[in-house]
Image: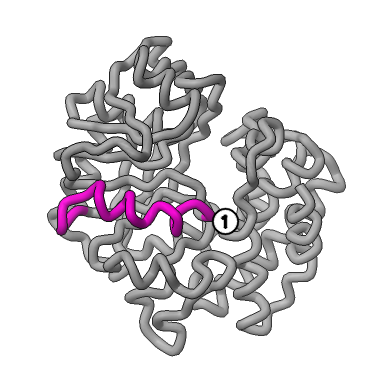
Amino acid sequence: MRFAILGAGGIGAYLGARLAAAGEDVVLVARGDHQRAMAARGVQVHDADGTRTIKVPALAPNEQFAPADVVVITAKAHDIAAMLPQIRAAGKPNALIVAAQNGIPWWYFQHHGGELEGTVLESVDPGGVIAKEIDPDRVVGCVIYCPITLMGPGIVEHEGPKRLEIGRPDGKITPELNALAEAFERAGFSAPRSENVRKEIWIKLLGNAPLNPIGALVRKTSGDVVEHPAGHKIVGEIMYECVDVAKVLGIDVSVSVEARLAQIPKQVGRHKSSMLQDVEKGRRVEIDGLVGAVVELGDRLGVDVKALRYVYMLAQML
């Protein structure tokens, strides 16, 4: 199975390195100093297995390579539309397209059923450009629980879980999905196959929707935010708003807000969220899929998301 990992920043580089170390055929596609460092010396990995450098082909976006069986998109959601030509070129005609983004993805309402079938969220996919271009039958949703810090060009550090929840928009567990999960498992990840990956998206959003923007705004780790009385209160309010939106969409997140709050210091501890890392490095933050999409859905569905709306407005000034 040949993998092409596009937008291979921190998580993409780590995933690609571990897949390559497990014997998979992998090519990383990245930009700038990060790409050049990986091309020159490989990916330097720091995790529970120790420190080592793993050689993986790392190309710039304009370089050509043999089409892959699996195209993994680890770029930020706001970059995907501009990457569509690259995505087309990266995979074979029947390649799986693994959408490994945080937040509400472009494909959420494809194969959804009911009145919302085919709904396009302007905050995620303006004009439905991505949804029109990528066949939902080839899409695999991927919810990532794998905290990564990009320490420098070509250098990644991991601490915590290594779990990739995967599932198709139509909920089917296919042989191709099983083969993908087995490749991830050989690389050291747990890869549960989900018949309802949308539920997994909302469970992760309970943490991401409040903690990413708040952490970036106040320059604190997720653990520091929830351990502060004010942070604990506002994060809890936003989590309840997310639960309310999910319920209207027919999703029972099956975890209480109180339990989710209690998990955060243990699960991510002092890890800096990806949004906080982006702010510190002067990069554009990924706000719309994580926060704007929930606000847009709240407005569409008549759910009060007042606390999240205020945080969203503040985060737009980052």
- Residue in view at x 21 percent, y 49 percent: 91
Main SS, magenta residues: helix
54 or 88, nearer to the observer: 88
Asked whether the viewer can see residue 145, the reply is yes
- Determine if the magenta segment contains residue 117: no
x and y percent of residue 288 in the render?
61, 59
Q: Is residue 244 above or below residue 261?
A: below
Q: In this view, does 145 lie above or below 25?
A: below
Asked whether the viewer can see residue 48, the reply is no
- Determine if the magenta segment contains residue 87: yes
* Lateral position of residue 59 relative to residue 79, left or right: left
Kindly state the secondary structure of the residue where label 1 is placed.
helix
* Lateral position of residue 7 relative to residue 26, left or right: right
* Lateral position of residue 303 relative to residue 142, left or right: right
x and y percent of residue 82 in the render?
45, 55
61 or 132, nearer to the observer: 61
Q: Mark 1 points at which residue?
A: 205
Label 1 environment density (alpha carbons within 10 Å; few <14, some 14–19, many ≥20): many
Segment tinted magenta in the rendering? 78-95
Q: In this view, does 214 lie above or below 44?
A: below
